[in-house]
């Protein structure tokens, strides 16, 4: 249940990153992954246990952002192909 915030935030963030100009996608996605990972670690209280949880949450958020980006980029292409 603690991993729901980084995954949901990452998927939503990836969909938002897909709407940016191509030159801004990578920096915005990286900054968003770090920010959401830190927030998820602090909110869940894992930071009090170990800072290593920060690395796990930032990495998980990054993977979720890439997945959200891929889904947001692929869905319109598939919808156009069906028309």
Image: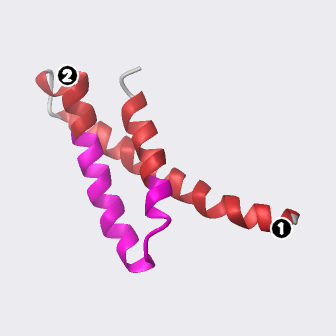
Q: Quadrant of the C terminus?
A: bottom right
Q: Position of residue 42 (x, y in %)?
A: 19, 30
Q: Quadrant of the N terminus?
A: top left
Q: Which residue is mark 1?
A: 81
**Residue drawn at (37%, 37%), measured in percent from left and top?**
6
Give the mark toward the camera: 2 or 1: 1
Q: CA distance from mark 2 to mark 1?
A: 45 Å
Q: Is residue 82 left or right of residue 75?
A: right
Q: Are marks 2 and 1 in contact (CB under 8 Å)?
A: no
Q: Which residue is mark 2?
A: 45
Disc on res. 60: none
Q: State which region is magenta.
A: 14-38
Where 66 sits versus 3, above or below? below
Q: Position of residue 68 (x, y in %)?
A: 52, 51
Please report whichever mark, 2 or 1, sits nearer to the chain's N-terminal start. Answer: 2
Tell which residue pokes out farthest to the left in this image: 48
Tell which residue pokes out farthest to the right in this image: 83
Question: Residue 16 in magenta?
Answer: yes
Local crowd size for mark 2, using a 10 Å CA cut-off: few (<14), some (14–19), many (≥20): few
Judging from the image, what secondary structure is the residue with disc 1 in?
helix
**Residue drawn at (19%, 22%), measured in percent from left and top?**
45
Is residue 53 in sight in this rendering?
Answer: no
In the image shown, does 46 or 43 lie closer to the viewer?
Answer: 43
């Amino acid at each position: 249940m603690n991993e729901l915030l980084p995954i949901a935030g990452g998927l939503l963030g990836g969909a938002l990153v897909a709407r940016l100009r191509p030159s801004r996608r990578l920096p915005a996605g990286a900054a968003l992954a770090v920010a959401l990972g830190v927030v998820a670690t602090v909110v869940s209280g894992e930071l009090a246990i170990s800072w290593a949880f920060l690395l796990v949450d930032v990495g998980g958020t990054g993977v979720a952002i890439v997945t959200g980006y891929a889904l947001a980029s692929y869905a319109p292409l598939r919808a156009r192909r069906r028309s």
